[in-house]
Image: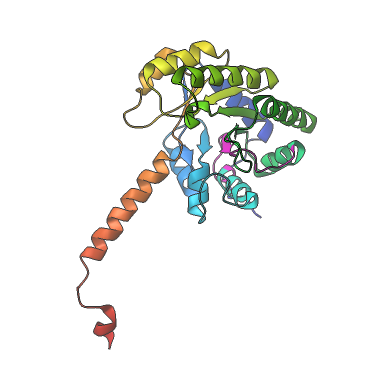
């Protein structure tokens, strides 16, 4: 497969750029691309790095989110996106598609991605979430494999208790903090408690996790300026941009369809 002639910076350098962007001085804000065209739009708008959305990538190739799409499809899309822009790209790998640590790292590197998300939701077992100890061990194995490969990939560990809402809100927050700390100790570079949160919850997460924190943002959530004031280091948008585009296209299609002659096309050509 040929590159899309957009990327020239070595992958190792992109990893270090992405890592430095998490350290400041400003808050890292990344839109989530779903294909090469959207990635180029975001690069042209001046963003310093780009994330991907698993839901958008899967939807664009005819699958649902949550590891419904084959891993080959997701990594092929990641490679097209990373090759289209000369910026660090961090890819949403969901829970890792049940791939061994070494293979996962090899495929991330082959795709040209500087980092990736890895979530602790269990998409294939009977439980909603992977046990924290098991997921921490997987993070450690992945970081070790990346070190062996000589590429310091940026691992963004998504932490999902607040998404699944098992137990009281206080218990969900406590489990999020417990898991996040374990993942950080295992080598995660950034922690991503998943969900749309109010200001009080964001503050509790930032203060309770000794690591860069990624917050999901969109309309009617805490404003970006306030997230920066609270100490959030990274902001992404999930599937929101992709969904908004699909909504707009749907409205356009319905408008065009409504303006067509009412006589069936088959009658017009008969």
Q: In the displayed orientation, state which residue is furthest to the right.
A: 148
Q: Could you tell me which residue is drawn at 49 percent across and 16 percent down?
A: 205
Image location of residue 218, percent across then percent down: 37, 32
Of helix, strand and loop, which mostly describes the magenta segment?
loop
Residue 230 sits above or below residue 155 on the image = above
User: Where, by quadrant of the figure, is residue 220 drawn?
Assistant: top left
In the picture, measured across the screen, residue 155 lies left or right of residue 233, that is right
In the picture, measured across the screen, residue 118 lies left or right of residue 162, that is right
Q: Is residue 246 visible?
A: yes
Q: Could you tell me which residue is drawn at 55 percent across and 17 percent down?
A: 177
- Whether the magenta-drawn stretch holds residue 94 is answered as yes
In the picture, measured across the screen, residue 196 lies left or right of residue 109, that is left
Q: Count the marks: how many?
A: 0
Quadrant of the image containing the N terminus? bottom right
Image location of residue 41, percent across then percent down: 43, 43
User: Where, by quadrant of the figure, is residue 137 drawn?
Assistant: top right
User: Where, by quadrant of the figure, is residue 118 drawn?
Assistant: top right
Q: In the displayed orientation, state which residue is furthest to the bottom.
A: 270
Which of the pair 79/46 is nearer the observer? 79
Residue 50 sits above or below residue 232 on the image = below
Image location of residue 103, percent across then percent down: 75, 41
Magenta residue span: 82-100
Residue 187 sits above or below residue 270 on the image = above
């Amino acid at each position: 497969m040929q590159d899309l002639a957009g990327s020239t910076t070595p992958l190792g350098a992109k990893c270090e750029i992405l890592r430095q962007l998490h350290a400041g001085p400003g808050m890292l804000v990344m839109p989530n691309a779903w294909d090469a065209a959207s990635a180029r739009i975001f690069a042209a708008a001046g963003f310093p790095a780009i994330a991907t959305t698993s839901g958008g990538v899967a939807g664009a190739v005819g699958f649902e989110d949550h590891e419904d799409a084959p891993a080959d499809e997701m990594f092929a899309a990641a490679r097209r996106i990373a090759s289209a822009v000369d910026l660090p790209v961090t890819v949403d790998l969901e829970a890792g598609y049940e791939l061994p640590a070494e293979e996962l790292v090899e495929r991330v590197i082959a795709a040209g991605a500087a980092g990736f998300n890895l979530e602790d939701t269990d998409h294939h077992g009977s439980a909603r979430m992977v046990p924290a100890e098991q997921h921490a061990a997987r993070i450690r194995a992945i970081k070790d494999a990346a070190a062996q490969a000589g590429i310091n990939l940026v691992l963004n560990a998504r932490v999902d208790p607040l998404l699944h809402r098992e137990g009281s809100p206080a218990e969900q927050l406590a489990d999020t903090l417990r898991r996040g700390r374990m993942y950080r100790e295992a080598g995660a570079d950034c922690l991503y408690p998943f969900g749309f949160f109010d200001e009080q919850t964001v503050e509790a997460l930032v203060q309770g996790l000794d690591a860069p924190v990624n917050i999901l943002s969109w309309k009617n959530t805490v404003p970006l300026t306030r997230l920066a004031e609270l100490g959030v280091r990274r902001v992404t948008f999930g599937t929101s941009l992709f969904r908004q585009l699909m909504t707009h296209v749907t409205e356009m299609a319905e408008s065009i369809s409504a303006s067509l002659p009412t006589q069936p096309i088959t009658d017009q050509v008969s």
